[in-house]
């Protein structure tokens, strides 16, 4: 039974654990100067482990280890996103690795641990395992950021840990309150209990959902602009991709389990919270001068938009709109940070003003980076336009009362268009060419072009991907 559970639901996670131990063992014998071998070994190991995910059973859903781990199409979707994103982050880490060659084993172990923690969060089917996964992700985020030199990042990590402890306490309070009512930590058992006692505990469950959701969202918000500003570009890519994937997975699970009360209390709470997150993110983006801080808060804005999809999670269109938006967001984010890593490869370009007139230095890469920015701005002929359009349409399908919220979201989206186009305009400023940019790294160039191409093609062939997201949402 144990081996069947491993093969059907936990094979990739077991292999990643083995890779971490193998890396620790190899670090005792392989010299640090062979950093290229270590890099290719780690990346190859992640790819091989990813292939084993095809052995997982998804139809019908498989419950492993006494129902504590679930394998279905929904978890498979998020696991694939985590694994592909982890591989891309590993490829984009070359410039950073060259500066920390004496810690290369530790860095790749932390990256693999981050992938493992994401898979545990996604596959968890009870609160205990979910909490363990969230703590592993927080630990990974702190450790992987500690490789960056500077006292500022150390102080930021300490503040991040203290704030997370506070929000973990709120999370555990909500979970224990739910346990006192349902006498279970298992998601399926909690869902069945709520359905059977809906008339008596409907409003209470809505408040518990608010407590747990706000703790998860606040854990996401604890990553402030200084965390991005003082971190490396590859670490920023890791943060801006892994945090939304894992936390959105948790929030969707919580909504599906506890939103059976059909209470408008949670909807009003989530609507106001989404508006506050988007408004705060736009305000900080407009004030940002540092390019990493700019895109870090831009990711916060997109996270706020994705949260609005939770308002119609009992609708297939609501879930599928979040899934599709997440795919476009990941592609766009990887493309943007690939471009930033390329331009920052041979000279320090940390401020937004450093990118003025880059069209005269590297025109083709600038055009590709512009396409990624147009996607964030939701301009037509980009995948970002379709993702916003589909997300907004899901709100109307869910409830016509959301039309007011939709109008506010549309106005906030105009602000996103403004600051994105303003940055694009600076790319094409008539300015004397600066020092020539030369970056020999192949991965940022390939990923930048690939993401720009995918963003453009998603506008014309979005229907197929949307249908796939709807199938995944329908089978949950």
Image (cartoon, rainbow, N blue to C red):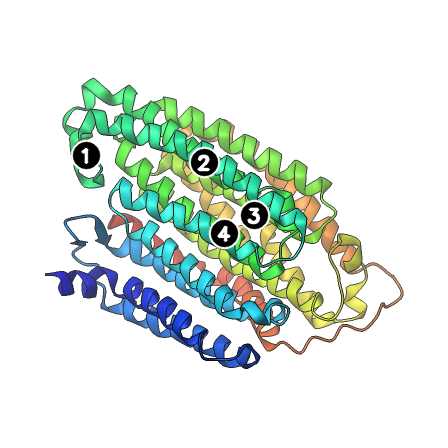
Left or right of 207, for residue 223:
right
Give the answer, above or below, for where 395 lies relative to 5: above
Mark 1 or mark 4, earlier in chain: 4
Which badge, 4 or 3, is on the more N-terminal residue? 4
The residue beneath circle 2 is 165
Q: Position of residue 452 (x, y in %)?
A: 58, 65
Q: Earlier in the sequence, mark 1 or mark 2?
A: 2
Measured Cα–Cα span from mark 2 to mark 4: 14 Å
- Tag 4 residue: 141
Q: CA distance from mark 1 to mark 3?
A: 35 Å
Number of other residues with Cα within 10 Å of mark 2, as a class: few under 14, some 14 to 19, many 20 or more: few
Please identify the residue farthest to the right as the structure is shown.
432
Q: Residue at x 38, y 26 (%)?
A: 266
Q: For this rendering, which residue is in front, 133 or 370?
A: 133
Foreground mark, 2 or 3, reads 2
Q: Is there CB contact under 8 Å for labels 1 and 2?
A: no
Spatial distance from mark 1 to mark 2, Cα to Cα? 24 Å
Q: x, y percentage for residue 374?
A: 63, 55
Which residue was labeled with disc 1? 184
From where the camera sits, is residue 226 visible? yes
Label 1, residues with CA under 10 Å away: few <14, some 14-19, many ≥20: some
């Amino acid at each position: 039974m144990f081996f069947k559970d491993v093969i059907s639901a936990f094979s990739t996670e077991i292999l990643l654990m083995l890779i971490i131990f193998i890396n620790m063992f190899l670090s005792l014998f392989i010299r640090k100067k062979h950093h290229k071998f270590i890099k290719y070994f780690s990346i190859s190991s992640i790819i091989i482990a990813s292939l084993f995910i095809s052995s997982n059973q998804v139809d019908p859903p498989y419950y492993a280890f006494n129902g504590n781990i679930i394998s279905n199409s929904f978890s498979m979707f998020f696991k694939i996103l985590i694994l592909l994103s982890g591989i891309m982050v590993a490829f984009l880490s070359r410039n950073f690795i060259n500066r920390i060659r004496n810690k290369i084993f530790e860095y790749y172990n932390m990256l693999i641990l981050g992938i493992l923690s994401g898979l545990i969060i996604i596959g968890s089917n009870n609160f205990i395992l979910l909490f363990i996964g969230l703590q592993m992700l927080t630990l990974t985020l702190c450790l992987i950021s500690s490789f960056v030199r500077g006292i500022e990042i150390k102080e930021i990590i300490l503040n991040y840990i203290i704030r997370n402890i506070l929000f973990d306490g709120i999370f555990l309070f909500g979970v224990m309150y739910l346990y006192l009512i349902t006498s279970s930590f298992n998601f399926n058992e909690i869902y069945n209990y709520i359905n059977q006692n809906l008339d008596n505990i409907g409003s209470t469950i809505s408040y518990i959902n608010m407590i747990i959701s706000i703790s998860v969202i606040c854990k996401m918000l604890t990553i402030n602009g200084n965390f991005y500003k003082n971190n490396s570009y590859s670490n920023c890519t890791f943060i801006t991709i892994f945090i939304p994937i894992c936390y959105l997975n948790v929030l969707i699970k919580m909504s599906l389990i506890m939103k059976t009360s059909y209470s408008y209390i949670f909807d009003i709470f989530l609507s106001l919270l989404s508006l506050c997150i988007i408004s705060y993110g736009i305000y900080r983006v407009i004030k940002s001068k540092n390019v990493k801080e700019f895109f870090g808060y831009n990711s916060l804005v997109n996270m706020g938009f994705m949260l609005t999809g939770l308002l119609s999670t009992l609708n297939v269109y609501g879930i599928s709109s979040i899934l599709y938006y997440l795919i476009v967001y990941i592609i766009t984010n990887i493309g943007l940070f690939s471009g930033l890593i390329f331009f920052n490869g041979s000279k320090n370009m940390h401020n937004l003003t450093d990118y003025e007139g880059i069209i005269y230095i590297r025109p083709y890469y600038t055009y590709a980076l512009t396409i990624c920015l147009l996607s964030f701005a939701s301009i037509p002929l980009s995948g970002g336009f379709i993702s916003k359009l589909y997300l907004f349409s899901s709100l109307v399908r869910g409830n016509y009362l959301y039309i007011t919220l939709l109008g506010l979201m549309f106005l906030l989206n105009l602000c996103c268009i403004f600051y994105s186009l303003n940055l694009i305009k600076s790319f094409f400023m008539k300015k004397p060419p600066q020092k020539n940019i030369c970056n020999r790294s192949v991965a940022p160039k390939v990923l930048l072009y690939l993401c720009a191409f995918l963003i453009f093609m998603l506008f014309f062939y979005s229907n197929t991907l949307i249908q796939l997201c709807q199938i995944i949402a329908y089978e949950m």
